[in-house]
Image: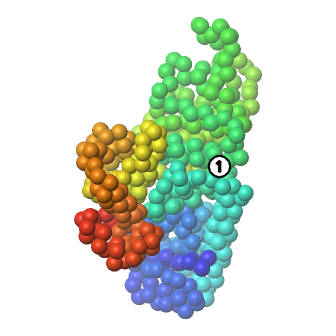
Amino acid sequence: MNDAKILLVDDEEELRRSTAQALELSGFSVETFSNGDHVLELIGYSFPGVVVSDIRMPGIDGMTLMQKIREIDPEVPVILVTGHGDVQLAVKAMREGAYDFIEKPFTPEMLAGVIRRAMERRGLVLENRLLKAVAGKRDDIEARLPGRTQVMVDLRYRIRAIGASDADTLIVGETGAGKEVVARALHDISGRASRPFIAINCAALPANLIESELFGHEVGAFPGAVRPRYGKFEHGRGGAILLDEIGSMPFDLQAKFLRVLQERMISRLGSNETVALDVRFIATSKVDLEAEVAAGRFRADLFYRLNVATLHVPSLSQRRADVPLLFLQLVREAAARYGRDEVAVPPEVISDIAQRDWPGNVRELRNAADRLVLGLDDGGPQTGEATGLAERVAEFERGVIASALVAHGGSLKPVYETLGISRKTLYEKMQKYGLDKRMLATED
């Protein structure tokens, strides 16, 4: 791990500085923090390093910081530094997932030795994840879930790692963020890809038929049951079951589903015989299930059973830098879907798209792309304005340059290299077409 880094957290400035210097002399790359507030911003599923934190600090203490890190990736090594009176607390932290603890006062050599072992373990974890994710497989995850922001890079990494396993998975995200796209991607890169993918909308199932829909029934199980019927769980055998918006599942049914999760067995309504299930369960939720547990609307045992492998799908507000590129891709897809010629999106439209809020997330952005391609918005393709060949060529050229500027975040060097023109030519054409790189740049 050549890019491995130690995140050192300690509220005592002198100790923090001296420890960092000693670790740097031992050959480590160290970034220091006086508290845990900003550490979590650097932690991701692909984070190639170790966290060393004092256990007692104002604000977010070492224990809380460790718990929050484990929510992001439980295999990031966290080493806690303790005072003499905190040993029992440190032992408790070890039981809850800390990699190790070291008691003050300590020698730099002692801490460096623990860190080296933790670095080796982290390196093996990342290498193993990568090997599992790409072993003999090519996938189209990036095409399905495009984006250059770190949250999207981490999401794709996690999908490839979790998808290669059979782990039941909980996918959390706002409405329209792409939770079902993530679920299908998980299935399609798994060993179950050739088997059924059964999507069940828990919010849309009729309350009086939900058990029959899921578990199936035998003849006479209830009035109107004149023939036996497989439930959706049985239809998905060998494949994956998507429980969309599982937070809407009735409370009394949650207990029965928990048993299915644990035992992988079901009984049809009206039958005493059990049927073995070989399925992978994937659940999605737009609501905070932990808050639902606290409110008594969702079973705590079911939540913790589902929460083993969790994917958080970011909203567009969390990945604003991806909006222009994503919109251009959605426009291309819409043009192909409606049988239209490729549409050159005006730069002022791209700028407006980048600055707007999208509470409906990708779903809302896709609708905007569709309207533009169909000419239903003012920002859509304007026919009849450029009638001559020269005007049409100029309009096309302007769109190509604007799209390239957006794609590279306003950075000019990759734009003129990609387009095969000189820097001077690019400047002249930007001036000619009124293109401002600041208008078309996006923040990471």
Q: Is residue 347 above or below residue 182?
A: below
Residue 81 can be seen, yes or no:
no
Work out which quarter of the rendered image holds the C terminus and state it. bottom left
In the image, residue 132 lies at what x, y percent?
69, 58
Q: Is residue 40 above or below residue 269?
A: below
Colouring style:
rainbow
Element at badge 1?
Answer: loop
What residue type is disc 1 on?
Answer: Ile
The furthest residue to the bottom:
25
Image check: 234 left or right of 311? right
Q: Nearer the viewer, residue 293 or 194?
A: 194
Q: Nearer the viewer, residue 364 or 423?
A: 423
At a point 44% along the width and 80% down the height, the residue shown is 32
Work out which quarter of the rendered image holds the N terminus and state it. bottom right
Q: Residues within 10 Å of mark 1 (few under 14, many from 20)?
A: many
Q: Is residue 432 above or below residue 370?
A: below
In the image, residue 162 lies at what x, y percent?
62, 53
In the image, residue 345 lies at what x, y percent?
34, 53
At a point 60% along the width and 79% down the height, the residue shown is 2
Q: Nearer the viewer, residue 202 or 39?
A: 202
Question: Would you name the residue on which mark 1 appears?
Answer: 189
Image check: 316 left or right of 156? left
In the image, residue 224 lies at what x, y percent?
59, 7
Residue 398 can be seen, yes or no:
yes
At a point 40% along the width and 82% down the height, the residue shown is 12
At a point 52% along the width and 44% down the height, the residue shown is 181
Q: Total marks drawn?
A: 1
